[in-house]
């Protein structure tokens, strides 16, 4: 059947149809590609459980590293013999920090950031203080947890 | 004789008239800044060298975090000529990036980006970004302490961009942290994604240059006394320069083989006085300028936003410089070009000597 009037020409109709199809196809493909290329993200742990024995004989005024997820954590025996735990990652650009026992400060060599023993920024570009964790001991287990996280270990 | 027959064979099948007349008529203007015309070809030559040395290195490199560092040591110590090819790839990259920056700042200062060559500038800008990412991903493949810290900083810095930062950061890292996943990802970028787009864009870039012809700086418009044929005069000069560059790369490779640092340890602090590759030093110094806290705002984020705006402005220069688009003298953009160049050079030198 031939229509007397048409709002669009046959060419316009086909171009819109195939153009739309092409756009739909390309955006669908691109979405799938991006979805696949984008990594499945892990999560920073809320707490880690360490073997307490490995961390009992830290000398005063020094640190011992432990893995906080994929990042660096420190068990820090302060000069006053108090033991604390903190994340050993600079708050500026995420470089690992080091403890300088002679200055009693934490230091980031990447952009020369300095933190005091309580993690406060003294000098350099870091915007925030270091992150400290809660440290509790349950028998043989040393539990390092984010502040405010309630840790419930499975009963063995 | 056989050459004549081969020529006939092609002539019977293809029409070369267009190419022949193009090559016969391709002229290069002669003026006092003419030397900068050679920087583009030189960059391309050095990139070709990178492709060749990279291809053979990929036969032996193991892109897995437990073996990557060791595989490079084996390439250098155990394989025939391995030391040479690793060295060539390293020094070739240094020189390529160096010449590329001369090419970029030369284009900026002579305003060769002006109408109608905006697309050449855009493809060139993307190639510059790709080249820097080539550099970053390339030296991350060493999987040594310095590379590890550099990639943490670079990807973490990108993470400070508002809105899209987090996405870019985890996309580049292949996860939340810089890990073995990041190494595989960067290897993929370095040997497949980036080379493909480099070839594509160099193709477009060079074709556009042929289409528009060489840009003549505004100040030299009336000083061009003669034109030199590209074939063979300028091409031969290109060859001379390429040969010298090859000589420099080989000499540096033989006498100053690059070192490799200690194997990266995600739980160790980076070494004292760590510095990125020289072409990141201007960014490195810029980051150091900003304090952690600027009137209650995160200084780091402000730094990254300002750097991004600076780069965006640089990218848009051909569209913002309305005067030179009309072939008028554009003093403001001459100064902007000088500021960019001086900032880059000075910050790089400060980063180098401190």
Image (spheres, coloured by chain):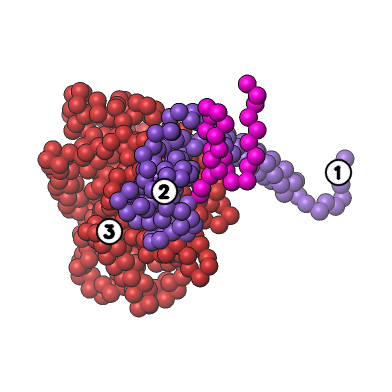
Chain colours: A purple, B red
* Disc number for residue B351: 3
- Tag 1 or tag 2, which sits nearer the N-term? 1
Q: Residue at x 63, y 36 (%)?
A: A151
Q: Residue at x 42, y 53 (%)?
A: A117
Q: Is residue B247 rendered to the left or right of residue B108?
A: left
In the rendered image, residue A150 lying in the magenta stretch gets the answer yes
Q: Position of residue A127 (x, y in %)?
A: 47, 59
| Chain letter belonging to callout 1 | A
Quarter of the image holding residue B6? top left
Position of the N terminus of chain A by quadrant: top right
Range of residues picked out in magenta: A131-156
| Chain letter belonging to callout 2 | A
Q: CA distance from mark 1 to mark 3?
A: 77 Å
CA neighbours of label 3 inside 10 A, class few (<14), some (14 to 19), many (20+)? some
Element type at mark 1 = loop
Is residue B170 at all visible to an observer of this figure? Answer: yes
Pointer 1 residue = A2
Position of the C terminus of chain A by quadrant: top right
- Same chain for the residues under marks 2 and 3 in the image: no
CA neighbours of label 1 inside 10 A, class few (<14), some (14 to 19), many (20+)? few
Q: CA distance from mark 2 to mark 3?
A: 39 Å
Q: Position of residue B350 (x, y in %)?
A: 26, 62
| Chain letter belonging to callout 3 | B
Q: Indicate whether B327 appears above or below A68.
A: below
Q: Residue at x 15, y 42 (%)?
A: B256
Q: B220 and B275: which one is in front? A: B275
Pointer 2 residue = A80
Q: Which mark lies nearer to you, 2 or 3?
A: 2
In the rendered image, residue B313 lying in the magenta stretch gets the answer no
């Amino acid at each position: 059947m031939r229509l007397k009037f048409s709002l669009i020409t046959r060419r316009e109709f086909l171009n819109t149809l195939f153009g739309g199809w092409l756009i739909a196809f390309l955006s669908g493909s691109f979405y799938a590609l991006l979805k696949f290329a984008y990594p499945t993200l892990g999560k920073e742990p809320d707490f880690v459980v360490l073997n307490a024995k490995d961390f009992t004989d830290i000398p005063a005024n020094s640190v011992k590293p432990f893995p906080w997820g994929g990042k660096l954590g420190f068990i820090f025996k302060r000069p006053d013999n108090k033991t604390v735990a903190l994340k050993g990652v600079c708050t500026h650009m995420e470089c690992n920090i080091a403890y300088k026992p002679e200055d009693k400060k934490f230091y980031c060599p990447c952009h020369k950031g300095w933190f005091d023993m309580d993690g406060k920024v003294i000098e350099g570009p870091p915007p925030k203080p270091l992150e400290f964790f809660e440290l509790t001991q349950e028998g043989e287990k040393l539990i390092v947890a984010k502040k405010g996280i309630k840790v419930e270990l499975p009963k063995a | 004789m056989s050459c004549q027959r081969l020529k006939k064979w092609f002539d019977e099948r293809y029409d070369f008239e267009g190419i022949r007349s193009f090559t016969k008529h391709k002229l290069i203007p002669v003026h006092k800044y003419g030397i900068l015309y050679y920087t583009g070809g030189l960059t391309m030559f050095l990139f070709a060298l990178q492709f060749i040395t990279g291809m053979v290195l990929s036969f032996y490199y193991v892109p897995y975090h437990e073996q990557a560092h060791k595989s490079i040591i084996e390439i250098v110590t155990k394989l025939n000529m391995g030391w040479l090819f690793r060295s060539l790839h390293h020094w070739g990259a240094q020189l390529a990036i160096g010449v590329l920056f001369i090419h970029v700042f030369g284009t900026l200062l002579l305003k060769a980006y002006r109408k109608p060559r905006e697309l050449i500038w855009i493809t060139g800008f993307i190639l510059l970004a790709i080249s820097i990412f080539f550099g970053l991903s390339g030296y991350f493949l060493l999987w040594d302490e310095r590379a590890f810290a550099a990639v943490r900083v670079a990807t973490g810095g990108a993470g400070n961009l508002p809105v899209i930062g987090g996405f870019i950061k985890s996309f580049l890292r292949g996860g939340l942290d810089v890990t073995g996943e990041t190494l595989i990802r960067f290897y993929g970028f370095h040997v497949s994604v980036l080379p493909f787009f480099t070839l594509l864009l160099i193709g477009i870039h060079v074709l556009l240059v042929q289409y528009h012809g060489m840009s003549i700086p505004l100040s030299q418009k009336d000083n061009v006394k003669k034109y030199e044929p590209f074939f063979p005069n300028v091409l031969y000069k290109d060859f001379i320069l390429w040969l010298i560059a090859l000589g420099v790369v080989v000499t540096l490779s033989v006498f100053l083989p690059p070192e490799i640092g200690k194997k990266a340890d995600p739980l160790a602090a980076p070494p004292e006085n760590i510095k990125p590759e020289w072409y990141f030093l201007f960014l490195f110094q810029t980051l150091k300028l900003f304090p952690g806290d600027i009137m209650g705002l995160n200084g780091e984020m402000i730094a990254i936003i300002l750097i991004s705006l600076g780069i965006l402005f640089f990218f848009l220069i051909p569209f913002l410089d309305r005067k030179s688009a009309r072939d008028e003298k554009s003093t403001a953009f001459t100064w902007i070009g000088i500021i960019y160049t001086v900032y880059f050079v000075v910050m790089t030198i400060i980063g180098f000597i401190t």
